[in-house]
Image (cartoon, helix red, strand yellow):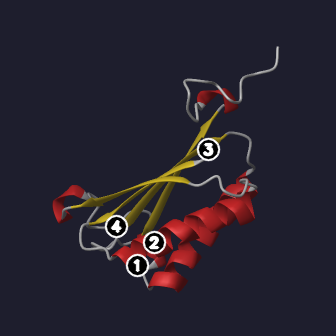
Amino acid sequence: MPLARVDVAAGTSTQTVAAISEVIYDAMVNTANVPAHDKFQVINRHAVDELVYPAEGYLGINYTPGIVFIQVTWNAGRTVEVKKAFYKAVAEGIHARTGLRKEDVWISLIDVKREDWSFGNGEMQYAPVE
């Protein structure tokens, strides 16, 4: 049920985008107990002036124009340890597969309730049991 939104620079290659996509999905399955085949992602490429980050850095981390913004909406309930493992798996995986700097992998998680999803047909597939 996760939805990953990935924002990268316009010049990011198709191969790099595919690797980022796979790393995110693999980390979801292997660290966050996401079911197999539950891969929903939206990937956007942006002009240089559309990816805004602090030029002076933030929290001791300096960014480059190669920054990758990742926002994942998923069901609430995962522990802090699972989230930490997810962040690490994504940053290290993207670095290993693409050479992008781990410092440039920026991740935000949004926790929602199970009933906050419709996977089609205008239905609430995970409706609460009454």
Work out how far the residue at label 1 is from the one at label 3, CA to CA, in angstroms: 26 Å
**Which numbered disc covers residue 74?**
3
**What SS does tag 3 mark?**
strand
Work out how far the residue at label 4 is from the one at label 1, CA to CA, in angstroms: 28 Å
Quadrant for the N terminus in the image = top right
Using residue 124 as the reference point, say whether residue 60 is left or right of it.
left
- For discs 3 and 4, the disc positioned in front in the rendered view: 3
Work out how far the residue at label 3 is from the one at label 2, CA to CA, in angstroms: 21 Å
**What SS does tag 4 mark?**
loop
* Amino acid found under the numbered disc labelled 3: Trp
* Amino acid found under the numbered disc labelled 1: Gln
Name the residue beneath numbered marker 2. Answer: 18
Work out how far the residue at label 3 is from the one at label 4, CA to CA, in angstroms: 28 Å
Work out how far the residue at label 4 is from the one at label 2, CA to CA, in angstroms: 27 Å
**What SS does tag 2 mark?**
helix
* Amino acid found under the numbered disc labelled 2: Ala
